[in-house]
Image (cartoon, rainbow, N blue to C red):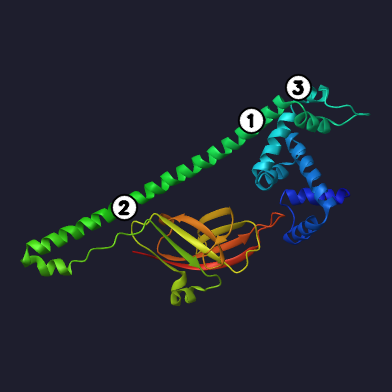
Amino acid sequence: MGLEGKDVLVRYLLGDLFPSDRERLEKQLSVDDQAREALAEAENDLIDSYTCGELSAKQRQQFEENFLNSSQRNDQLAVAQMLMDHAVREKITAAPIREQKGPISWRESAAAFLFGKHFAMRLALATAALALAAAGFLAVENWRLRNEVNMAHLEQPRLQRQLNYLEQQANATSATGSNTQNQDHSQTAKLEEPPLSQVSILLSPHLSRQQVSRNPNNRLVIPDGTHMVTLKLDLEQDAHRQYDVVVETVDGTAIQHIERLTSQGTGNGGRCVAVQLSSRQMSRGDYVVTLYGREANGELPVVDSYSLSVVRR
């Protein structure tokens, strides 16, 4: 492939192609062996450029966010960074790998060295790769455990309210059985259901404020004691890899701006973008939620807008 073709492959690996161009390239890769070989070579060159600091700031960010999306690529990067050590490369180049007429590149020397008779070096690299994978796994587990602890803290008040509610029911039942004079009062006493710690709503696009007042689908009731609010923005078309969301009041006061969200399933075969907010940010009134799609060239076109009416209890 020419220079233009290589540039396209690099942009593809960095996630910088338009969706239509990406689909055409992926179709070509599925049937063209030469294209797949060129892609593998572009991957190696891109890893080397990143390791040597030859990428621009934007390309480094795209590389870290879009290219390093698998454990295999992270292992390739770890090996490349190890091989960039001058002492390691000298040892590889000087090692008696095999007889060959003419010079060979350091990459060929490294491949022969790593996969030839030098078991100790291969074992060290494999151990380093496993250590990197274990570190990544532990980081993910640490984040998951912290998230579970935070959710447990949020759930604790709700569980306490439920316990108080059950105690009230038990006391009311006991009073009814032991004191007939308070029977009518016990039967008519109203015990409030404890509020939820989190509420969510699936918002439909294109509804005006008047339509929201007549259509309860975009009307959110937030009970007292609620901690979190999840707004699920229904997608008519899931045409972007990432989305930005802006929540503001009808008079234009910004409430929250969330960047780089991805879509998820709605449970009924549809797709949506979910936004989590603190209930303290959502006072009684009307809101406008605007959904933007992130383009590969950095533009943020408006995808949809959603009207929301909030009621506090």
Is 198 left, or right, of 239 in this rendering? left
Q: CA distance from mark 2 to mark 3?
A: 60 Å
As rendered, which of 182 and 138 lies closer to the eye?
A: 138
Q: Earlier in the sequence, mark 3 or mark 1?
A: 3
Q: CA distance from mark 1 to mark 2?
A: 46 Å
- Within 10 Å of disc 1 (Cα), the crowding (few <14, some 14-19, many 20+) is few
Q: Amino acid at mark 3?
A: Ala
**Which residue corresponds to the image point at 33% horizontal and 54% vertical from the top-left?**
158
**Which residue corresponds to the image point at 88% horizontal and 31% vertical from the top-left?**
104
Q: Are marks 3 and 1 in contact (CB under 8 Å)?
A: no
Residue 118 position by quadrant: top right
Total numbered circles? 3
196 is higher (above) or lower (below) than 209: above
Q: Amino acid at mark 1?
A: Thr
Residue 34: image x %, image y %? 85, 51
Q: CA distance from mark 3 to mark 1?
A: 19 Å
What secondary structure is found at the residue carrying circle 1?
helix
**Which residue corresponds to the image point at 58% horizontal and 62% vertical from the top-left?**
291
Residue 212: image x %, image y %? 47, 73
Report the residue marked by disc 1. Answer: 127
156 is higher (above) or lower (below) than 174: above
Q: Which mark is residue 87?
A: 3
What secondary structure is found at the residue carrying circle 2?
helix
Q: Which mark is residue 159?
A: 2
Q: Quadrant of the C terminus?
A: bottom left
Q: Amino acid at mark 2?
A: Leu
Q: Which mark is residue 138?
A: none
Label 3 or label 1, whichever lies nearer to me, is 1
- Within 10 Å of disc 3 (Cα), the crowding (few <14, some 14-19, many 20+) is few
Q: Earlier in the sequence, mark 1 or mark 2?
A: 1
96 is higher (above) or lower (below) than 78: above
